[in-house]
Amino acid sequence: MEPPVLSADLEPDVSVLMTVYNGMPYLADAVESIRGQTYSRWKMVIVDDGSTDESGDYLDSLDDPRITVIHQDNAGTAVASNHGLKLCETEFLARMDSDDICDPTRLEKQVAFLRDHPNVGLVGSQIVPRGAQKAGRVIPLATDHESIYSQLRKGQHAMCHPTILMRTALLKGIGGYWKQHGMFDAWDMFLRMGEVGELANLPEPLLQYRIHTGSINGKHMRKLQASIEFACELARRREENLPEIAYEDYFAQRARAGLLSRFAKQVNVYALLQYRLASIDLLGGHRLRGYARLAWSGLCSPGRSVNRLLRQLKLA
C-alpha cells in the first residue's frame, strides 16, 4: 500500500501507539487495518517489547515512512506504552492492539467526535469479538460519561483499550500509564482520564476484538482482577483525599482478608475465566463445550452473568 503524500498543512494529528509481544500471526492484519484508514493524517509508533517470534522481522520489513518501530527488551506493556508515548507529539493518540482489526472509518469518526466534543478527553467504541471461525455479536458498552465512569469505578467493563482515541496532552498530564504496578494498566488510566475530562464510547462498533486462548488462564485472570481492584482503590483514595497506598501494601492488606472473602474472590475469578473461555469456544465453533462453560460461569457468579445478559439485550 502506497502511503499518501501530505502537504505541510496536513501533517499528522493522530499518533497510533501499538505495543507488541509475540504478535504473529495476527500482527500484519492489525497493522494493515491502520494503513487502510480513510483518515490519512496519522503516524504510527510500534514498540516491540522483546518479541521472540517473527514479529520483529515483520516490523522491520515495513517500508512506510509513517511507521516508526522501536525494539526494546521485554519490560511489560506499561513500560512499552510509556516508551512509545515519548514519541507521540500529535494532538490525538489512538491505541491499537497487535491482534485486533480496525474498521476503516475508525480514526475518521473518532477524530470528528473529539473535535465536536471538546469536553471529552477520551473516546472508545463498541466492539465485535472475533474468534477462530467467526465474529460474534456487538458487545454493547455505555456511551455517556456518567455511566462509563460509574461502571469503571465498580470494576465493571465499560471501555475497550484498543478502541480508544484520546487527547495526548491529557494523557501526558496525568503521567501516562502505570510505571510498575502490574500487567493491566489501562483501567487506572481510564479512571484518571475520567477525572480530568469526560469519557465516551461511540455507538457503533469500530473494532474486531480478537479472542483466543493465548495467555487466558487462571493466573492471567487473577492478575487482571487484582489490577482492576487496585485501580479502583486508588481512585477511591483520590476522591476522599487519602494518601496513595503502595501496590505491595494494598495486596498485603488484601491477603489478610477473611477466608470467606478470599474464597469469594477466587470464585469470581474462576467465573470470569470460564466466561472468557466460553466466548472462545462459541466463536470457534465448539458450541457444546462453550455452553457448558457458560453454565459454570453462571453458577459461580449469577450476578455477573445476569448483568452481561442484560447488556446483550441492551436493557442495562
Image: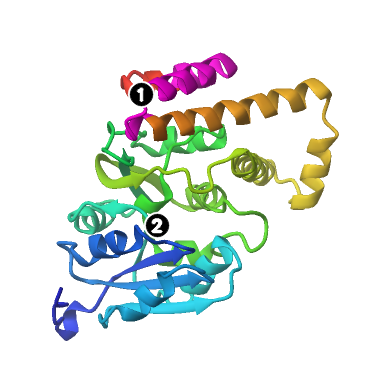
Name the N-terminal-most of marks 1 and 2. 2
> Viewer-proximal residue, 151 or 115?
151
Which residue is identified by label 1? 287
Q: Which residues are drawn in magenta?
A: 282-307
Which quadrant is the N terminus positioned in?
bottom left
> Viewer-proximal residue, 193 or 66?
66
What residue is drawn where x is 53% and y is 68%? 80
Look at the image and say whether residue 300 sits in the magenta stretch. Answer: yes
Estimate the x, y position of residue 202 in percent, counting from the top left: 27, 43
Query: How many angstroms separate mark 1 from mark 2 (CA)?
Result: 27 Å
> Viewer-proximal residue, 71 or 12?
71
Q: Main secondary structure of the magenta part?
A: helix
Q: Residues within 10 Å of mark 1 (few under 14, many from 20)?
A: some
Residue 131, compared with residue 7, is above or below; it is: above
Residue 208, compared with residue 294, is above or below; it is: below
Closer to us: mark 1 or mark 2?
Answer: 1
Estimate the x, y position of residue 216 in percent, counting from the top left: 53, 42
Q: Residues within 10 Å of mark 2 (few under 14, many from 20)?
A: many
What residue is drawn where x is 41% and y is 35%? 280
Which residue is identified by label 2? 97
What residue is drawn where x is 40% and y is 39%? 145
Q: Secondary structure at mark 1?
A: helix
What residue is drawn where x is 67% and y is 41%? 233
Using the image, tell me which numbered label, if any, was put on residue 164: none
